Image: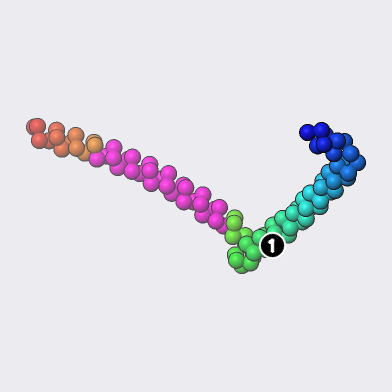
Amino acid sequence: METILQFMKSEMFIIYLTSFCIIIFLLYIANLAKLAKLRKEYKNFMQKLGNGTNIEDMLNKHIEKINKTITKNEELEKFCTNLDSDLKRCIQKMRNI
């Protein structure tokens, strides 16, 4: 245990730690550069697919339309269910007379 503490107090440990931090920082910078390049290529790719328009925007608009249609269908189903139950009551009243 003492040897580890002595090594941590030595100048070599500080040099190793500093070099390790510099390497990690350089890798971080390289990763940021690659990410920026990838985002630029993604935007260009999406615009080429849509003949000048952004495919991602088109997909988002279609998803919104689909969601609106789903809610309208649910409302229509509820209305039809209520209409069916009302119709059953009307038929029962006619039979009793």
Q: Residue at x 88, y 44 (%)?
A: 12
Q: Is residue 50 above or below residue 35?
A: below
Q: How many marks?
A: 1
Quadrant where the N terminus is found in the figure: top right
Name the residue rendered at 33%, 40% in the picture: 78
Instruction: Say which of 71 and 36 sits in front.
Output: 36
- Please give the residue where the numbered disc 1 appears in the rendered image: 41
Main SS category, magenta section: helix
Of 45 and 69, nearer the camera is 45
Q: Is residue 65 magenta?
A: yes
Q: Residue furthest right?
A: 11
**Residue 54 vertical position relative to residue 86 in the rendered view, above or below:** below
Which span of residues is magenta-colored? 58-84
Q: Residue 36 sits in which quadrant?
A: bottom right
Q: Nearer the viewer, residue 45 or 86?
A: 45
Q: 10 Å neighbourhood of mark 1: few (<14), some, or many (≥20)?
A: few
- Residue 58 horizontal/vertical position (percent): 57, 57
Q: Is residue 50 left or right of residue 3?
A: left
Left or right: where does residue 19 sit relative to residue 75?
right
Q: Amino acid at mark 1?
A: Glu
Instruction: Indicate the position of residue 97 as horizontal and vertical percent values.
Output: 8, 32
Reply above or below: 50 against 3. below
Lateral position of residue 53 relative to residue 35, left or right: left
**The stretch drawn in magenta includes residue 29:** no
Q: Is residue 18 visible?
A: no
